């Protein structure tokens, strides 16, 4: 903290620097209403800003002969020469009458985020790449939104490639993600290993290029009644860029410091850059190169546009110290290509056609747990020193959304839209073997994969009545959605066990090869990740019909009330009706209270119902075969596990907002009760099944939870001459209680034992606070942030050992298994310099002081490394340089 205060003092000293020319003003429509989020750009440069909730802006001008471009979607763009004026107020005329931007959480076109009766963060992405070295949306939100949490995984199979993320301690599948207000498809991956969000699917936001995003709106409140299933925790709406001022882009290079802060024995794999798994000593790894370009062009003279983004990224893996059986502990490697387009074309003064979508391709590469040379899982003639399998994957996301917006003569607005999206996840296992094939085994296998597709057709109507009371908005509509979940099998060698004659085992009479060293039967399937077999194949569909009504009424200039109701019918889970009510009362100028109450519903995902796999789990360094049985299987019923049903929720919130001049603050408390929450069980003894597995797991409506907490967002900006100083504080305090474990007659410690309970609570940290500061002047800017992550505790594999192994006291194994991660503060810093109006350079570091989580015993952690997956990460300091350009 002392370092943070010293840095803020240094910022203050910059206020003495000679100021440059600046201009301020307001942008409004022809009726005098402020346009929120309108764009002001110095033509031909990346220098620009957006208007605030009052339509106001202030911009430092780099070129005394500049031309300023004022734009807002749906309005005619204006260009105004800068002639030294200190203030300019702009009225934008509508090119068409339907392009105004709604803020998520309200279907009114006349509502700002600060005037909303619920908590909404609006995060301007436009300048984040110049202030932040994060290259993915999840990590940007981790440091920008108070109750958003995401973490990098290692040794968690598919989750190494797609980060699970959540709001307010809920599951990844309890937050709905929208693009331009339209539902985004989920990932086909379901988290099943030692990850946060175990048993959940989620939306892969990292498949969307940061360079394509104008802003991110985070609705931190239950919204199932407004937007449908999956919105129990809230909604994240990603708004794509719509500017038309030419080409902008950047080239970024970064790398991680391999020098860990703890002392390790020289024999520990990957300690302090030594004993690398794949090459010689290194002081830096995880080398990352990212290139992105964004091009905007006007279409016609009435506000039409096309905005195109492309991104190429290449990231090497990081390796950090681990146990002898986990020599590849670290973040996965990634090579990806991204393309996205956002567009709109006016048809006439009242109608426009719009379309957006894109394709994301990623080739990923992560290490699984190592196999030593004296195990039945290894063939000495192929790997005399043992081996570490690599789980590689090809992940593609495609999406396309198109629609018509129209304003009728009576003032009603109509939006008809169809959105299609698909996630495709294909595994290829390398540096591996099928041990039952012995010397004849290949070392690479196509292991199959999974996909999910979603098509959503929606029709929405809304109208604002400015003469009803102090203003009212009415909206209603319907949505029809279909989903398809597929598991496709890999090649036979990726999953089969072979006999001594090299034939796939189909009969108990066939003789399986025995390892000459251990005397154990050799297991089948590709080591590291066994492929999906023909028996695992799934092709399931369902449909959903939703109908909603939504209204807002300003009873006076000081009091706003709103309500929503939504009916949904699932083809496989029946009907549900959800409600929401909210209010906002203005106590005094700039000061208001707000609150809401809502019910929520989430049907089990198709993956939770039908996903199945046989895999290898490492328990304290020992490999065990596990069966994850689908929910509709007779095996699942035989263990007493019931069919999945929907989750239900009640969400309450109350808060205070204050906004005056340069200072704004919001504080919101929340209470979220979820019944029948779907989780993944612990490990049941499955040796009696005679399926060559030790344990079995199942998806269950296993628990009821109660979550309460407080979110805090404070911002202050000050112009010192023409220099700009900003300070911000975000914070979240959270408490998740497991109110009920619904094990019935089953053993509670096996159904959902302490280890799973600790994992769930670690995904809902007790608190997170972030303090950030920025200062901009002339050609220089500097930004810093200090983020503190709370203490969390997870349980290692010792919990399954005998108390006698840890002194004999009852509960000794449980106490010994507690891996406590103490609070840590991460400091980020960067400096930017504008070389000329068309280029700038940024140098910076995330985690500048190379902070690491608390060191654990790698022999017992779930990851096999000295650190589990925690919010602050486990790769240490990241240094980067970025060159921005415009043409």
Image (cartoon, rainbow, N blue to C red):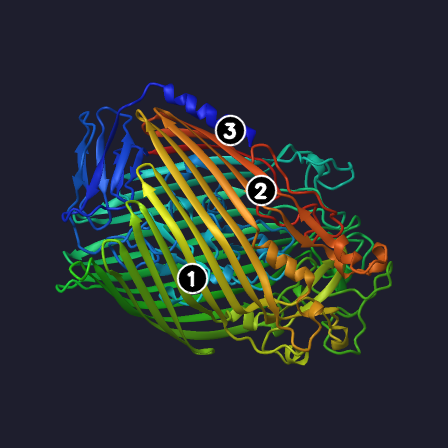
Label 1 sits on residue: 222
Q: Judge by depth and name the residue closer to the eye, 739 or 677.
A: 739
Judge whether 332 appears above or below 515 on screen: above
Q: Going from the N terminus, do you reach mark 3 or mark 1 first? A: 3
Q: Position of residue 658 (x, y in %)?
A: 35, 45
- Number of residues whose C-alpha sits closer than 10 Å to that of mark 1, classed few (under 14), some (14–19) or many (20 or more): many
Report the Cα–Cα distance between label 1 and label 2. Answer: 38 Å
Residue at (62, 74) in percent of width and height = 535
Q: Where residue 5 appears, x then y in whole percent?
A: 51, 29
Label 1 vs 2, first from the N-terminus? 1
Left or right, 691 with respect to 775, comes to right
Residue, x 63% and y 39% (percent of image)?
Answer: 852
Image mark for residue 5: 3
Q: What residue is at 50 percent from the left and 48 percent from the top?
A: 732
Q: Are marks 1 and 2 in contact (CB under 8 Å)?
A: no
Quick one: quadrant of the N terminus?
A: top right
- Check disc 2 and report the residue beneath it: 316
Residue 235 screen position, x and y as percent: 41, 58
Give the residue displayed 30% in from the left and 51% down from the top. 586
Left or right for 269, reference 555: right
Residue 688 vertical position relative to residue 666 in the rendered view, above or below: below
User: Which of the two residues, 215 or 302, is positioned nearer the viewer here?
Assistant: 215
Image check: 274 left or right of 310? right
Q: Earlier in the sequence, mark 2 or mark 3?
A: 3
- Secondary structure at badge 1 equals loop
Q: Which mark is residue 862?
A: none
Tag 3 and tag 1, C-beta contact below 8 Å: no
């Amino acid at each position: 903290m002392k370092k943070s205060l010293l840095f803020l003092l240094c910022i203050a000293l910059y206020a003495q620097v000679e100021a440059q020319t600046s201009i301020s003003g307001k942008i409004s429509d022809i009726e005098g209403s402020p346009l929120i989020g309108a764009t002001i750009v110095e033509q031909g440069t990346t220098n620009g800003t957006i208007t605030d909730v009052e339509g106001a802006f202030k911009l430092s001008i780099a070129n005394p002969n500049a031309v300023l471009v004022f734009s807002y979607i749906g309005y005619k763009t204006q260009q105004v020469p800068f002639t030294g004026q200190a203030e300019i107020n702009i009225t934008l005329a509508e090119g068409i009458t339907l392009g105004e931007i709604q803020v998520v959480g309200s279907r009114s076109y006349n509502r700002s985020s600060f005037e909303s009766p619920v908590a909404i963060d609006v995060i301007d992405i436009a300048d984040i790449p110049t202030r932040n070295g994060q290259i993915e949306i999840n990590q940007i939100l981790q440091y920008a939104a108070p109750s958003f949490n995401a973490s990098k995984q290692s040794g968690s199979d598919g989750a190494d490639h797609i980060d699970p993320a959540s709001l307010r301690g809920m599951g990844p599948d309890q937050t709905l993600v929208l693009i331009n207000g339209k539902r985004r498809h989920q990932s086909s991956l379901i988290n099943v290993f030692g990850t946060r969000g175990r048993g959940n699917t989620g939306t892969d936001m990292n498949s969307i290029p940061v360079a394509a995003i104008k802003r991110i709106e985070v609705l931190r409140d239950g919204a199932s009644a407004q937007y449908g299933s999956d919105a129990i925790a809230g909604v994240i709406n990603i708004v794509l860029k719509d500017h038309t001022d030419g080409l902008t882009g950047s080239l970024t290079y970064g790398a991680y410091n391999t020098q860990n802060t703890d002392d390790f024995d020289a024999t520990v794999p990957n300690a302090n850059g030594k004993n690398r798994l794949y090459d010689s000593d290194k002081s830096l790894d995880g080398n990352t190169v990212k290139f992105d370009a964004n091009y905007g062009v006007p279409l016609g003279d009435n506000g039409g546009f096309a905005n195109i983004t492309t991104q190429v990224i290449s990231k090497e893996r990081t390796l950090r110290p681990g146990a002898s059986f986990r020599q590849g502990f670290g973040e996965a490697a990634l090579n990806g290509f991204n393309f996205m387009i956002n567009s709109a074309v006016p048809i006439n003064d009242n109608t426009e056609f719009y379309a957006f979508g894109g394709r994301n391709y990623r080739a990923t590469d992560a290490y699984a747990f190592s196999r030593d040379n004296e195990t039945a899982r290894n063939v000495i003639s192929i790997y005399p020193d043992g081996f570490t399998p690599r789980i590689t994957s090809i992940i593609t996301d495609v999406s396309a959304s198109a629609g018509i917006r129209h304003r009728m003569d009576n003032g009603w607005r109509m939006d008809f839209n169809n959105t299609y999206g698909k996630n495709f996840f294909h595994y290829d296992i390398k540096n591996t073997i099928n041990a039952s094939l012995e010397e004849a085994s290949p070392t690479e296998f196509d292991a199959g994969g999974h996909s999910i597709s979603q098509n959503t057709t929606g029709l929405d109507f809304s109208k604002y009545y400015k003469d009803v009371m102090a203003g009212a908005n009415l909206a209603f509509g319907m949505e029809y959605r279909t989903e398809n979940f597929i598991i496709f099998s890999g090649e036979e060698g990726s999953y089969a066990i072979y006999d001594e004659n090299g034939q796939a085992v189909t009969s108990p009479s066939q003789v399986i090869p025995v390892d000459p060293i251990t005397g154990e039967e050799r297991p089948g399937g590709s080591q590291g990740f066994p492929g999906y077999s023909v028996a695992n194949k799934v092709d399931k569909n369902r449909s959903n019909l939703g109908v909603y009504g939504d209204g807002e009424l300003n009873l006076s200039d000081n009091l706003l009330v709103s309500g929503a109701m939504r009916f949904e019918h699932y083809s496989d889970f029946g009907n549900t009706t959800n409600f929401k009510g909210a209010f906002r009362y203005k106590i005094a100028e700039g000061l208001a209270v707000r609150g809401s109450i809502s019910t929520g519903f989430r049907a089990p995902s198709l993956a939770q119902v039908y996903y199945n796999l046989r895999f290898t789990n490492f328990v304290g360094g020992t490999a065990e075969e596990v069966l994850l049985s689908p929910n509709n299987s007779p095996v699942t019923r035989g263990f007493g596990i019931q069919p999945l049903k929907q989750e239900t929720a009640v969400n309450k919130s109350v808060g205070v907002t204050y906004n005056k001049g340069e200072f704004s603050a919001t504080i919101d408390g929340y209470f979220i009760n979820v019944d029948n929450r779907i989780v993944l069980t612990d490990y049941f003894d499955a040796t009696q099944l005679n399926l060559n597995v030790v344990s079995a797991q199942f998806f269950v409506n296993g628990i009821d939870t109660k979550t309460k907490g407080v979110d805090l967002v404070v911002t202050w900006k000050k112009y010192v001459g023409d220099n700009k100083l900003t300070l911000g504080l975000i914070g979240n305090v959270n408490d998740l209680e497991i109110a009920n474990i619904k094990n019935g007659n089953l053993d509670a410690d096996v159904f959902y034992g302490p280890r799973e309970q600790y994992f769930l609570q670690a995904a809902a940290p007790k608190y997170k606070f972030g303090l950030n500061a920025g200062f901009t002047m002339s050609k220089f800017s500097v930004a810093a942030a200090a983020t503190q992550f709370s203490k969390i505790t997870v349980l290692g594999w010792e919990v399954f050992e005998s108390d006698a192994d840890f002194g004999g006291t009852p509960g000794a194994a449980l106490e010994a298994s507690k891996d406590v991660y103490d609070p840590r503060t991460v400091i980020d810093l960067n400096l930017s310099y504008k070389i000329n109006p068309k280029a700038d350079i940024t140098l910076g570091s995330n985690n500048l002081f190379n902070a690491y989580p608390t060191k654990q015993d790698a022999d017992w952690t779930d990851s096999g490394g000295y650190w589990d997956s925690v919010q602050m990460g486990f790769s240490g300091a990241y240094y980067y340089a970025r060159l921005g350009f415009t043409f």
